[in-house]
Amino acid sequence: MSVSQSEFRAALLDPAAPVPEGLLDDQARPAGRRFSVYRNNVAVSLTEAMHQAFPVITKLLGPQNMDGLAGIYLRQHPPTSPLMMFYGENFPEFLAGTEQLAHLGYLPDVARLELALRRAYHAADSHPIAPDALAAMPPEDLMQARLGFAPAMQLIRSDWPIHAIWRFNTDDGAPKPEPVAQDVLITRPEFDPSPHLLPPGGFDWITAMQAGQTIGRAFEATTARTPAFDLGATLALLLQGSAITSVTIERPET
Amino acid sequence: MLDDARRQNRLPTAPGVGYKPQHYAEILAQPGPVGWLEIHAENYMGDGGRPLAQLRHLSERFPISVHGVGLSIGGEASLDAEHLARLKHLVGWLNPASFSEHLAWSTHDSQFLNDLLPLPYTDATLARICDHIDQVQETVGRQMLLENPSSYLAFSESTWSEPDFLREAARRTGCGLLLDVNNVFVSATNLNYSPQAYIDAYPLDQVGEIHLGGHDEDQDDHGQPLLIDSHGRAVVDPVWALLDYVLDRSGPKPVLIEWDNDVPDWPTLRAEAERAQSALDRIPA
C-alpha cells in the first residue's frame, strides 16, 4: 500500500480526513494519532508564524481569534515558498473577505502596514545621500532633480487612521486614534524599520518621484490636488529615514 | 559523485549551537566552549538588513554551518529551482564550514508545509533522493550532509532500514551524513527498536556533524510513549548517554545543540554546550 505525497498532504490539511492507509505504528496497526503529530506541527508552526508576522492584528483581534483565523488562512493560503519571512502576503485580502470582520474595516490596511514593515526589515541595504545634499543645491537645479529611493522604503495609502492604530497598539503613551485617512511612509535608517505619518500630498509626491518625475514636476502635480502640500516636511522625513539614495540632475537643453 | 577536493566539511570537533538573534551580543562576548554556529538557511535568504549583517559579522568569528530546512529533498516532484538558486547564492557568499539538509519532504504542488514530512524507504524513494542530492551538490558546488529524521509512524511499503537507506544514499551520491542523536532516540522509542542497534548499523564513518535537541513526551492511541522532536527544551539524560555511545565508536565529531522553540537565555544554552564539551572530553584523543 503506497501513500502518495498528494494523499499525505490532503490528510495533513484536513483534520476530518481519514489517515491514509499504509501509515502504521510499530505493530503494524493504523498510525492514528501518530499522524496527528504532523497535522499539529504544520498547523502550530504556521499559526505561530502568523502571530509573529502580525503582532498588531493579533493584539486587535485577541490571540485566540488570531489562532482561529490563522487556521482558516493556512488552509486557504498555504505558504508557496520556504521563505517563512514572507508568509502571510494574502492576509490583507483574506481579512477584507472575511464577513465576520466587516465591521473592523481598518484591519486589512493595518495588515498591509505590518507586511510592509517586514518587507522593509529584509530589504537590500543601501547608502543614503548626505543629509545636506539637497539643501546645498541651487533651487533651479533642485527642481530638475530626480531621486532614487532605498529598497527598504515602503508607502501605504489608507482611508483609515492606520498610523495612529499601529502606534496605539505598540506604544503605551500613544493617543487614541481619530477617524481620519492616513498615508504612511516606512523608512529603515539602519536595521529597524519605522512607520511615519505622511503630510497631505506626501504620498502622491513620493509616488510621482518613484515614477521618475523631477522634483519640480512632481511638486506641481501634487499641489494641483493638494495646495497645502509641504515639500520640506516630506523631504525631511525621507532624509531622516535614509530613504533617498541618489540625486540626478538633467539640465534643460540649451 | 563529488571528488575529494569538494568534501570540504570544515567544522571543528567542538560544540556548536543553533544561532538565535537574541543571543547575538552574548555569543560574541561569552562564547564559552562554543566553537561554531549553525543557521537555518531560509532565515538568511532576504535581500539585506540585520539578519545578513549579523551573519556576516558572526562568520568572521565563528565557522558557520548552513542547515537547510526547506529544500524538500524527498519531494516527489523536481526540486524548486528558485530555492536551489537561493541556496547556491547563500553558500557562495558565506562559504560556510558545512552545509546540510534533511531526509524529508516539505513541498508538494508548490505548497510549502513548513514541516519535515516522512518518506517510505523504498528503491523508488532512494533513486529519487539520490538524483536530488546529486543536483544539490552539483548546483551548490559542495558536499551536503543528509540528516536522519524523527519518525512518528512507519510506511507499510518500506523495504529498507533507515541506516541502510542512509548508507546507500551516501555511497551513491558521495554526500556525508548528519547524525541527529535525539532523532534516533525519538524514532527508536516511537517505533520500538533499540537506539544502540540503530547506531551499530549506521555508517558512523560518514558522519560530518551530530545534532542534539530536546523532545516532548506524549502517548499514542494505545497508551504507548510517543516522543515528539520539539527542540523546545534541554537534552534529556538518555540522549546524552546515546551521544557517549556514538562518540565511543565514531571518535570526536562536531556536536550541535538545537533549541529552536521556547529559546532559553544564553547561559542556559551555553550550559548545554558545556555538557557537549564534557562528552567530547571524555573520548580518548
Image (cartoon, coloured by chain):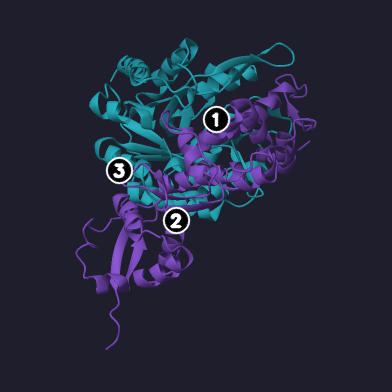
Chain colours: A purple, B cyan
Q: Secondary structure at mark 1?
A: helix
Q: Where is residue B264 shown, x and y percent of the image?
A: 41, 20
| Rendered location of residue A224, percent (x, y) | 46, 69
Residues at marks 1 and 3 touching, judged by CB atoms closer than 8 Å: no
Please name the amino acid that badge 3 sits on.
Answer: Arg
Q: Residues within 10 Å of mark 3 (few under 14, many from 20)?
A: few
Using the image as rendered, state which of residue A115 and residue B219 is in the foreground: A115
* B269 relative to B207, above or below: above
In this rendering, which labeled residue sits more in front, label 1 or label 2? 2
Q: Nearer the viewer, mark 3 or mark 2?
A: 2
Disc 1 crowd, CA 10 A, few/some/many (<14, 14-19, 20+):
some
Q: Nearer the viewer, residue B219 or A45?
A: A45
Residue furthest front in the image: A227
- Residue B60 in view of the camera: yes
Instruction: Sort mark 2 into few (<14), some (14-19) or many (20+) by Cα contacts within 10 Å.
Output: many
Have a look at marks 1 and 3 and say if they share a chain. no
Q: How far from the left and from the top, in percent, is residue B52?
A: 35, 44
- Point out the tag, 1 or 2, that comes first from the N-terminus: 1
- Chain bearing tag 3 is B
Classify residue A16 as left or right of residue B64: right
User: Are the residues under badges 1 and 2 in a single subunit?
Assistant: yes
- Amino acid at dot 1: Lys
Q: Amino acid at mark 2?
A: Pro
Q: Secondary structure at mark 3?
A: helix
Pick whichever, B58 or A116, lies toward us: A116
Q: Residue at x 55, y 23 (%)?
A: B229
- Mark 3 vs mark 2: same chain? no
- Label placed on residue A190: none
Residue under label 3, please give it. Answer: B56
In the picture of the structure, the residue carrying the numbered disc 1 is A59
Q: Chain of mark 1?
A: A
